[in-house]
Amino acid sequence: MTSSSDAISNEQDAAKRNLWLHFTRMSSYADSEVPVIVRGSGAYVYDQHGKRYLDGLAGLFVSQVGHGRTDIAEAGARQAAELAYFPLWSYAHPKAIELAARLADLAPGPLNRVFFTSSGSEAVESAWKLAKQYFKLTGQPGRYKVLSRTIAYHGTSMGALAITGLADIKHPFEPLPPGGIRVPNTNFYRAPDFVAGDEAEFGRWAADEIERAILREGPESVAAVFLEPVQNSGGCFPPPPGYFQRVREICDRYGVLLVSDEVICAFGRLGYYFGSQRYEYQPDIITFAKGLTSGYAPLGGMLVSDALIEPFTTGTATFLHGITFAGHPVSAAVALANLDIFEKEDLLGNVRANEAAFRATLEKLYDLPIVGDIRGEGFFYGIELVKEKTTKETFNDEESERLLRGFLTPAIFEAGLYCRADDRGDPVVQLAPPLISGQKEFDAIYEILHGVLSEASSLL
Ligand SMILES: Cc1ncc(COP(=O)(O)O)c(C=O)c1O
């Protein structure tokens, strides 16, 4: 055994013995290697054996500018040397100030105040807490409920989990904080028959379901609606035309806050700084994380409208909430360097110029019997797999387990593509490459998926 294979073997042992992987069935690595990713460059990452993979999911919808950008790394190192840490509890530091001002400039309308967090779950949690305290301060203390869509993922902390619409990941932690109410999502492929033919009509129905839920719960008890611009979980559900405009009207009618959860959709994923800008609606709060730093350091937060901050700007009122590492100086410096690259390299322009080509390349997969629906926008796509294309019949649990966990996920990775086969709703392959990607990367994604999905079709 060479010394480097010794090192790899020791690392494998420690990975299996000491490290706890998130949302991972640890037993699945009992007889196989834990994949260990050691470095990245551009749209590619490399494992401990030196094998290269196309990063088809930007890590986890994070690595917008791609891997290995030394300019961002250096900005973080400079900040760590100058001021590694100071809290945002009653004190400020220059990079958090500069970043807050820059985000306020980029954000739509009167979203001018930034409350930083360290993650997306904390951003969602903070938005719910803000909504509750805001209503208590403004004489509507009964408003605490939150509406969100079926199968939507909004994070894992207890509050965020109560907003999340995935029953399986909630059950072990019940009872969750009360007040999480579900409304239909915008999966047009699986629209109910009575609105299946017309996307705009489907959108009206889905938005009106929000109004019905508000009326059913009692408007005086509803604080906020949490919606992603394009829902990720379930495999990329873009909003039907007019959907968000109608939701905005409904929220205004009943005094309910509209929270745009843009943890994935902000910072270029849809070709705009914020997803709400693409679909032209004005949220009261935007939650963000992931792409703000392209993953070079952790950072999240919420952008809050002038109206919402107003009760906190006079007298003794304080938003009674804080997080030690929120707005960390190194993360803020990294975010600023990341946004500089967005500007210098016109990454939003790259997404807008290439999104049609990405879609067209993926749509060539429709020749496979297993590919039921390809949906998404920008550099954000889901491919729904079906057992039978004409009837849209989906897989049962055993088939899903065998096909997705047993075959697809390892086969795609083995073929050199990192992405995700997900069965939290109907089975989908999720794609979200770094925003620096172009036709070369789209073709590589297509080639690998075509090969693996053809084989999957033959296994059915
Ligand atoms: C829409 C949305 N909200 C919240 C979260 C939670 O973010 P985090 O994993 O950073 O806590 C995610 C994570 O994927 C997300 O996609």
Image: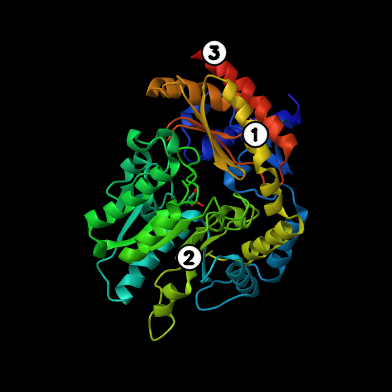
Q: Amino acid at mark 3?
A: Ser
Q: Residues within 10 Å of mark 3 (few under 14, many from 20)?
A: few
Q: Position of residue 209 (x, y in %)?
A: 31, 49
Is 120 rendered above or below residue 235? Answer: below
Residues packed near mark 1 inside 10 Å, few (<14), some (14 to 19) or many (20 plus):
few
Instruction: Residue 293: give x, y in percent of width and height.
Output: 63, 57
- Marks 1 and 3, Cα distance to the nearest angstrom? 24 Å
- Residue contact between numbered discs 3 and 2, judged by CB atoms under 8 Å: no
Where residue 138 is drawn, which disc sits there? none
The mark found on residue 323 in the picture is 2
Number of residue marks: 3
Q: Which residue is mark 3?
A: 458
Tell whether circle 3 marks a residue whose Cβ is less than 8 angstroms from ligand 1: no
Q: From where the camera sits, is residue 329 visible?
A: yes
| Quadrant assignment for the N terminus | top right
Q: Residue at x 44, y 54 (%)?
A: 244
